[in-house]
Image: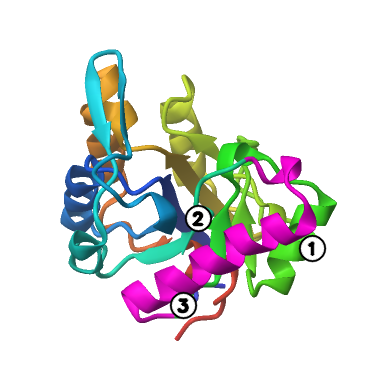
């Protein structure tokens, strides 16, 4: 399936905030690949907030190409609105403008996205496809490893805050079936500071690292670029 392997691991993290610096370092240390979903219209010093005393700040564009090198960039819409509440033209602008700005910033084709707030419907999916989006992550966790029926509405296996994360990971590692299996983890890196649990993501990556039976790729590599060579 993926370079002859039928198990794959991929990550999806949102918002382009400063805690991504630490997260990228962990991913790079253990050989993981992630798709980072960014809002090109919010990359300013003013785009910040606090959660339980933790300062959360989006990064400015100048830092990002070098930081995310080796990973994938995807659309998270220009200003992070709930798309289901917008008319068709506004949805199209949010997606297309973000895609265009990110392609210019990173010098690469943008193929995917994550729906802000997980808000989507058939109309939003159709417009996303018309804007050149080929896969899009929802917020509906599957707690499974099956490939999505449609890449334009795929659910991750779980969020990193899921209480059963360790058990789900071990079930994935033990899987020896013939059907392809994908373990996809998502979240926001600031949550590790808010919850004081950076050890969760580091332990998970350390457990996965070096497994010869697993393909480690970005969302598009896992969902779209099968049979890699």
Which tag, 1 or 2, sits closer to the chain's start? 2
Nearer-N-terminus badge (1/3): 3
Q: Magenta region: which residues?
A: 82-108
Distance CA(mark 1)–CA(mark 3): 31 Å
The residue that disc 1 covers is 126
Q: Is residue 37 left or right of residue 143?
A: left
Q: Residues within 10 Å of mark 1 (few under 14, many from 20)?
A: few
- At numbered mark 2, what does the secondary structure look like: helix, strand or loop? loop
Q: Residue at x 59, y 36 (%)?
A: 117
| Side (left or right) of 154 relative to 229 | right
Would you name the residue on which mark 3 appears? 3
Residue 56 position within the rendered picture, expressed as x and y whole percent measured from the top left? 27, 31
Residue drawn at x 47%, y 62% is: 74
In the picture of the structure, the residue carrying the numbered disc 2 is: 78
- Where disc 3 sits, the SS reads loop
Q: Position of residue 18 (x, y in %)?
A: 22, 43
Secondary structure, mark 1, is: helix
Closer to the camera, 27 or 75? 75
- Mark positioned earlier in the residue sequence (2 or 3): 3
Taking the magenta stretch, the answer to whether it contains residue 105 is: yes
Q: Main secondary structure of the magenta part?
A: helix
Quadrant where the N terminus lies?
A: bottom right
Q: Is residue 176 magenta?
A: no
Q: Residues within 10 Å of mark 3 (few under 14, many from 20)?
A: few
């Amino acid at each position: 399936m993926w370079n002859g392997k039928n198990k794959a691991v991929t990550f999806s993290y949102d918002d382009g905030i400063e805690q991504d610096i630490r997260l990228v370092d962990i991913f790079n240390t253990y050989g993981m690949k992630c798709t980072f979903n960014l809002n090109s219209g919010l990359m300013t010093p003013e785009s910040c907030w606090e959660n339980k005393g933790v300062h959360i700040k989006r990064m400015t564009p100048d830092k990002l190409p070098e930081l995310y090198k080796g990973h994938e960039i995807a659309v998270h819409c220009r200003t992070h609105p709930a798309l289901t509440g917008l008319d068709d033209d506004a949805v199209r602008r949010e997606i297309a403008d973000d895609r265009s700005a990110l392609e210019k910033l990173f010098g690469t084709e943008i193929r995917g996205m994550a729906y802000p707030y997980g808000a989507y419907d058939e109309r939003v999916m159709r417009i996303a496809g018309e804007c050149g989006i080929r896969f899009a992550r929802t917020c509906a966790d599957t707690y499974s490893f099956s490939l999505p029926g449609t890449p334009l509405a795929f659910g991750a296996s779980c969020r990193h805050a899921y209480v059963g994360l360790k058990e789900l990971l071990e079930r994935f590692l033990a899987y020896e079936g013939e059907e392809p299996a994908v373990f996809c983890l998502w979240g926001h890196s600031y949550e590790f500071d808010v919850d004081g649990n950076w050890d969760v993501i580091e332990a998970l990556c350390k457990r996965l690292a070096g497994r010869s039976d697993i393909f480690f790729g970005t969302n598009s590599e896992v969902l779209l670029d099968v049979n890699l060579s």
